[in-house]
Image: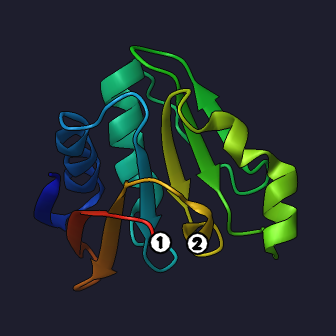
């Protein structure tokens, strides 16, 4: 069972927390990232993607909804911020990616009720301008 807690003091430490989490991730895991704007969701995902692919350029797919990365395992990085409804989410085709690689999801609020398997939830909150608290735990679907 994945359960971790980090206090990070800057982007490099948040990225390293992603790398540490990566050590416990498997091919078909779903990892959701919750937290306010600018808290470090994409930074932490950058650490995960670097761990599996070695790629340094990782951007939030806010405008394209999905970025795909190839490496040790396929990674599908979703940003659902611009999705306005469950129906719109269906048109994205997210189900086509489940079980085909590691799925990382920012702004998962609309998809959580649709996930029908265990997933890992990453909660990030501000402690101060540069300091973050990151709590990671497994969740089961309802």
Residue 97 rendering spot, x and y as whole percentages: 64, 35
Mark before the other along the chain sequence, 1 or 2: 1
Q: Nearer the viewer, residue 112 or 131?
A: 112
* Looking at the image, residue 24 lies above or below residue 8: above
Residue 4 rendering spot, x and y as whole percentages: 12, 60
Looking at the rendered structure, the secondary structure element under dot 1 is loop
- Left/right placement of residue 115 relative to residue 32 reads right
Q: Nearer the viewer, residue 123 or 98?
A: 98
- Left/right placement of residue 39 relative to residue 111 reads left
Q: Quadrant of residue 108?
A: bottom right
Give the residue at mark 2. 113
Looking at the rendered structure, the secondary structure element under dot 2 is helix
* Looking at the image, residue 129 lies above or below residue 142: below
Identify the residue at horizontal 35%, vertical 52% (top origin): 44
Q: Quadrant of residue 14?
A: bottom left
Contact between labelled residues 2 and 1, with CB atoms less than 8 Å apart: no
Number of the label disc, if any, that sits on residue 38? 1
Classify 10 Å Cα crowding around label 2: few (below 14), some (14-19), many (20 and above).
few
Question: Marks 1 and 2: which is nearer the front?
Answer: 2
Residue 122 rendering spot, x and y as whole percentages: 33, 64
* Looking at the image, residue 1 lies above or below residue 111: above
Residue 53 rendering spot, x and y as whole percentages: 41, 20
Identify the residue at horizontal 40%, vertical 72% (top origin): 39
């Amino acid at each position: 069972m994945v359960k971790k807690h980090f206090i990070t003091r800057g982007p490099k430490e948040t990225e390293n927390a992603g790398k540490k989490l990566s050590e416990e991730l498997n091919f078909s895991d779903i990892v959701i990232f919750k937290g306010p704007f600018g808290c470090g969701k994409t930074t932490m995902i950058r650490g995960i993607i670097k761990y599996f692919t070695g790629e340094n350029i990782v951007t939030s797919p806010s405008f394209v909804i999905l970025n795909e990365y190839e490496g040790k395992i396929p990674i599908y990085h979703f940003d659902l911020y611009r999705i306005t409804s469950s129906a719109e989410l269906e048109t994205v085709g997210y189900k086509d990616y489940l079980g085909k690689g590691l799925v990382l999801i920012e702004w998962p609020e609309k998809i959580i009720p649709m996930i029908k398997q265990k997933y890992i939830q990453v909660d990030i909150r501000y402690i101060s301008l540069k300091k973050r608290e990151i709590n990671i735990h497994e969740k089961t679907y309802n």
